[in-house]
Image (cartoon, rainbow, N blue to C red):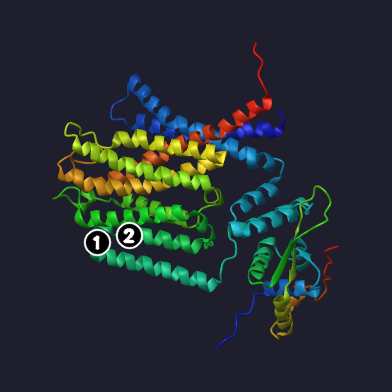
Amino acid sequence: MTGPRRPSAQTIAVVLALAEQPATWRYGYALCQQLDLKAGSVYPILMRLADRGLLETSWERDLPAGRPPRHLYRLTGPGRVLAEELAAAPSAPAKTARAAGGVGRRPRVEGT
Amino acid sequence: MNRTRRLGRLGGLVAVAVAAAPFAWLWVLQMHDAPDPPTAQVRLDMGIWMAVFGTPWMIAAWLLWRAWWRETGARLSTLDGPGWLLAAAAAILPADRRDWGAAMAAELAQVQDHPARWRFAVGCARTAVFPPRGGRAAVGISGAVAVAATAAAALVTGVALPAGRVFVPVFVGVVGGLAVARSRPLGRAGRGVGVAGLALVGIAGCIGATIWYLAEYPLTRSGHPPSTSATLSPVTAVVLAVVLAGCLWLAATPPRWLAGDRHGRRFGVAGALVMAAGFVLVSRLEQRDTTLDAGIMSYLLLAAPAVVLAGSVAAAVAGRSFRSGLAASAWATVLGALLVILTWLAEAPRWYRQGRGLLLDGDGGGMGANLSDAIWWTLIVLALWALPVGVLGAAAGSARPRRSNAREHAGPVSAP
């Protein structure tokens, strides 16, 4: 018997990036920039994570007039558990770690 | 005149031109293909017929454009290219993904650099057009099931019902392909049980009647090869299969503007039922009258569009919106087409047994010819004639309360 299929490298990168500051709400475009991924890759991943209850979503409040509210994301409890498992897994590729901001790139702080 | 108004008028003219183009092309084609050089009178007569059928479409195209422009287009005209692309892509997202379209649009508003805006919008559009579905394994399995079902349908039909060897596999294949291509939740069907139920009855009835015709009357003329006398030619078989599969899909996963309107659904269902009941009534009345052999062509050309028109006006008045009338018109056309084909195929044998020929016009011909008549005439009359008339009805019905409201707000009118 085999366990659940390991997520793609890009999914792992998104999960690990969100897990860096699990209490902080993040924006989709900022995740794209941080991970150097296209929106066409990041948004389907965010949708799947939200569908599976691994991601919590909310709309931005207290925004300046004339600007539409942005969608915010952060990991749920099960999402954080998954992030810990992925971070601990030995097969996590180096590229994933780099993309997640672990090497050479400082993650941006958002939600301020 | 500001830019938005100019764009709105220009778009309206383009919509009218696009609607007129097929009729102009048809006129040119008929003049070109005529065996003898057409006289000026023939050209004029044909032009008048094209104008009769084309004018409702041109007016309907203008009304549809105007409604869309007022609701969405004027806002879109203030956007740049990436904004347009993202708004258009987000519009096709299913209801359960609508928030994601708004999320992407809000993010785009934060991106200032023009090339970055394009890159972001293109990526989001790709996500909107191909939203994530269930696991790839599930898609692969459903695809394999669809291919296997199509192959099995082809094999079984080839042996058991040779006359249906195009229709049945194409229907199964199109339904399977749609199911694999777009796995959308069926949550909205709960708001349109009547519509979905009636559509299912119509589709099942059309399939059953078609198979019966093909089994009983595979050829319209005995002693002729199937290539010249098949009851269901390959082209007609493909058209019928695609239409029925499309209706099934529409009933199961209707788009937002069709699913959400209560008045549109109710008046659409009522219109379709009235249309089918009227069809049976006219057929039975003509069967009793031995002096008439006119068939039901006049009913199709005059009464069916009138029913769609009445339904769309009523829905627009009840819902106080153009959209309600439009939804009623669309549902009456779709459901009415299914029910009229079904009742046509059910009534035709009675006519035939009385020696009255084909149900369409009383002309002679093999019983099987009723099948093609039912399909083509119903689709042509309802889609090309009744549907634009329904759009006009939606505009008329939705305009009425607005005028009365304007009068109320204007206060008493003093006599001159």
Task: Count every numbered label the image shows and give the total.
Answer: 2
Residue B17 in sight here: no
Tell whether A5 sits left or right of A18.
left
Kindly identify the residue that appears in the image at 68 percent across and 67 percent down: A46
Q: Chain of mark 2?
A: B
Position of the N terminus of chain B, as image quadrant, is top right
Residue density around tag 1, few if under 14, some if 14–19, many if 20 or more, within 10 Å? some
Tell whether A76 sits left or right of B188.
right
The residue nearer to you, when weighing A97 against A83, is: A83
Disc 1 marks a residue whose amino acid type is Leu
Q: Chain of mark 1?
A: B
The residue nearer to you, when weighing B125 against B103, is: B103
Of labels 2 and 1, earlier in sequence is 1
> Where residue B227 appears, x then y in whole percent?
23, 51
The secondary element bearing badge 2 is classed as helix
Residue B231 in sight here: yes
Disc 2 marks a residue whose amino acid type is Val
The secondary element bearing badge 1 is classed as loop
Q: Which residue is mark 1?
A: B161
Q: Which residue is mark 2?
A: B168
Against A26, residue B372 (above or below) is above
